[in-house]
Image: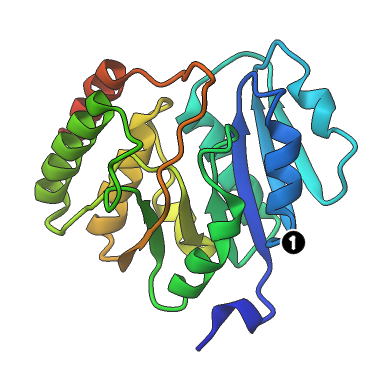
Amino acid sequence: MNIISNQNKICAVIPFYNEEKTISDITNRTLRFVDTVIAIDDGSTDNSYDNINSIKNVILLKHKKNEGKGKALKTGFEASIQNNFDLTLTLDADLQHPPEEIPKFLEALSFYDVVIGNRLNDLSQMPVQRILSNKLSSGLLSLKAKRKIYDSQCGYRGFRTKILSSILPHFTGYEAESEMIILAARENYKLGFVSIPTIYGEEKSNVRPFNIMAGFIKTLFI
């Protein structure tokens, strides 16, 4: 079964915070593969919101203040559920997740409930500290979920929307992505992985490996 041709309503949830340089590009490229982009401005102080405010087929939501990626994802997921989308993708706004990989996720969603990008097949472009934190968190999460998790920190994902209400995150930061994996495993949903390229731009990242690990540890106790 090829899910791409099945007349599914497909959306992509893209949270962003001060991404005025990339938000328009990622949105337009993503719209080549989905029906709607649900973009969540998580309290940006730059021109990110205005840069996509006039793009068609975009549901643009805004947090008054920066509340964290987990909170922004939850806002987007709730909008996807309310608008009756069949499939929901998540991408970061900084172009580290090329939208051209979306067909891989859609194809895999023919067989799985949750599909997670796996960057660990090519570590040549990943900073050493990110490799270490990712391997450690993925190993611990595999034990917690009682199944192999290849890339726990990758935010490039696909979901069958009908399951989202049962795995919505409670954590508000990056740890929400690990929390969702744990919740999906508890519900015995089928988890799959697709290989994607590792891309890091020249922009200074908002991600701090230590903060990710500190937040991740909290999810081991849920």
> Residue 210 in the image: x percent, y percent?
25, 17
Question: As drawn, which residue projects farthest toward the right?
Answer: 54
Left or right, 205 with reference to 189: right
- At x 30%, y 40%, the residue is 124
Return the residue nearer the eye: 164 or 181: 181
Return the residue nearer the eye: 203 or 188: 203
Colouring rule applied to residues: rainbow
In this rendering, the answer to whether 205 lies above or below 194 is above
> Residue 165 in the image: x percent, y percent?
48, 53
- At x 39%, y 34%, the residue is 170
Total numbered labels placed on residues in the image: 1
> Residue 174 in the image: x percent, y percent?
39, 29
- At x 23%, y 19%, the residue is 214
- At x 40%, y 21%, the residue is 207
Quarter occupied by residue 134:
top left
Find numbered disc 1 in the image and state the secondary structure of the residue it sits on: loop
Quarter occupied by residue 46:
top right
From the image, tell me which residue sits under label 1: 35
